[in-house]
């Protein structure tokens, strides 16, 4: 169990390194371009990509909450 925990812990520590590589690649592409509309487009795309997982998890949480509330109501009746 400890080995599994340590493996997962070290794997999660390495994730920022992988993510940072992508950010530097995007920055290099945007710095070479003098037009700022591309940078705005990429920033908007990042925001859209970031929002959808939160919306999906929130919708799933609401569905679970509603189904549990309905189950409690049916137990009382």
Image (cartoon, rainbow, N blue to C red):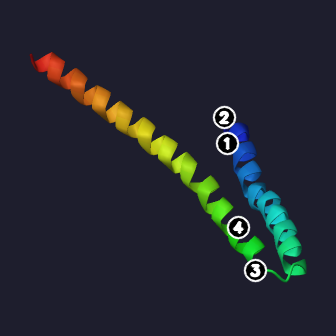
Could you give the CA–CA distance between mark 1 and mark 2, rounded to whole angstroms?
A: 6 Å
* Residue 12 point in image, percent of width and height: 71, 52
* Residue 63 point in image, percent of width and height: 37, 32
Residue at mark 3: 36
Q: Nearer the viewer, residue 36 or 51?
A: 36
21 relative to 70, above or below: below
Q: Residue at x 16, y 23 (%)?
A: 73
Residue 41's disc is 4
- Tell me the mark number nearer the camera, choosing from 1 and 3: 3
- Tell me the mark number nearer the camera, choosing from 3 and 2: 3
Residue at mark 1: 5
Rendering quarter of residue 62: top left
Could you give the CA–CA distance between mark 2 and mark 4, rounded to whole angstroms?
A: 45 Å
Q: Which quadrant: the C terminus?
A: top left
Q: Earlier in the sequence, mark 1 or mark 4?
A: 1
Could you give the CA–CA distance between mark 3 and mark 2, rounded to whole angstroms?
A: 50 Å
Q: Earlier in the sequence, mark 2 or mark 4?
A: 2
- Tell me the mark number nearer the camera, choosing from 1 and 4: 4
Rendering quarter of residue 26: bottom right
């Amino acid at each position: 169990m400890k080995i599994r925990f340590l493996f997962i812990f070290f794997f999660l520590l390495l994730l920022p390194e992988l993510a940072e590589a992508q950010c530097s690649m995007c920055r290099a592409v945007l710095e070479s371009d003098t037009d700022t509309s591309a940078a705005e487009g990429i920033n908007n795309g990042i925001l859209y990509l970031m929002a959808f997982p939160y919306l999906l998890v929130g919708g799933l949480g609401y569905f679970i909450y509603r189904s549990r509330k309905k189950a409690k109501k049916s137990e009382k009746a």
